[in-house]
Amino acid sequence: MTAPRDLARAYWVVIPAYNEAETVRDVAMRARQQCPNVIVVDDGSTDGTARALAGLDISLIHNEENRGKAGSLWRGFQHALAHGALGIITLDADGQHAPEDIPAFLTMSLHDPGAFLIGARRCDQRKTSFWRYGANRVADFWISWAAGQLIDDTQSGFRLYPATFLRAIHVPHGKERSFVFESEVLIEAGLRGMPIDTISIGVMARTGPSPSHFRPVRDIMRITWMVGGKLLSRGMYPVGLYRALTGRNLCEGSRQRREERSTAQRQ
């Protein structure tokens, strides 16, 4: 499925890449087929990632030194916002995410422009690694609590960020924030009363030689530390815990409308 071109032109795709020369060109080419505005942020790669993109009709931002995923995403966001993006879609450069799923994000955003969208991996795919799945579930619980609404697959990097939201926030994005940044952004969205929806996606196994940059134990500890600080500053936010456990989110009206829309689409 290809999204209507007039809709796709209003959105930008940001692909952070660190040493992904084997896969980034294919990912960028396929993303370009779905959306004309594609940015690849080469995060100080040493394997020729930038050279692999030669000749493609995309925007290439090169970090002279490695800034981490958070810093790369932030640079991509600012470039897209400066060019009038209505929303920004992010996906990984390692080939795990299918750019062909981009139209599903665009279509849902058209119906609910203020929603923060996450591409949620199917449960069977998330369970392929016991330790990674366990770490992700821990993160899901803590982040849902701090955000005040139940969120599935909080560690998925396939997302759609509304531009109005990105213009209103400033989340720390230094190199040490890495994957913490994406979790903190979700908490900010939840605390601002934004609906956070999920879109079911499939994922492919990594095809390039570079290992995943996500370290389950280290990164989940950093995320938990960040979330714990936010909860302590709000008196442990018992309302948020209740909403996370029961699924009663901050925006019940929006949630009901989304459920009605989903039912209508299936009929």
Image: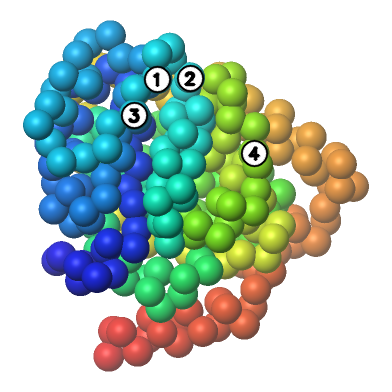
Residue bearing mark 1: 63
Residue pictured at 44% horizontal, 29% vertical: 72
Horizontal and vertical percent position of residue 96: 24, 38
Q: CA distance from mark 2 to mark 3?
A: 12 Å
Foreground label between 2 and 1: 1
| Element under disc 2 | loop
* Spatial CA span between label 4 and label 3: 21 Å
Label 4: how many Cα within 10 Å (few below 14, some 14–19, many 20+): some
Q: Which mark is residue 125?
A: none
Q: In which image quadrant can residue 44 be found?
A: top left
Neighbours of disc 3 within 10 Å: few (<14), some (14-19), many (20+)? some
Viewer-proximal residue among 172 and 214 = 172
Proximity of marks 4 and 3: CB atoms separated by less than 8 Å = no
Looking at the figure, which quarter contains the N terminus? bottom left
SS for callout 1 = strand
Residue located farthest toward the left when viewing the structure as drawn = 55
User: Could you say which is closer to the camera, residue 106 or residue 40?
Assistant: 40
Look at label 3 and name its amino acid. Answer: Ile
Q: Nearer the viewer, mark 4 or mark 1?
A: 1
Question: What's the distance in space between the residues labelled 4 and 1, CA to CA?
Answer: 19 Å
Mark 4 and mark 3 lie on one chain; the one further toward the N terminus is 3
Residue where numbered disc 3 is placed: 61
Query: Is disc 4 placed on a helix, strand or loop?
Result: loop
Label pair 2/1, CB-CB below 8 angstroms: yes
Of the image marks 2 and 3, the number of the one nearer the N terminus:
3
Q: What is the x, y in percent for residue 154?
A: 51, 46
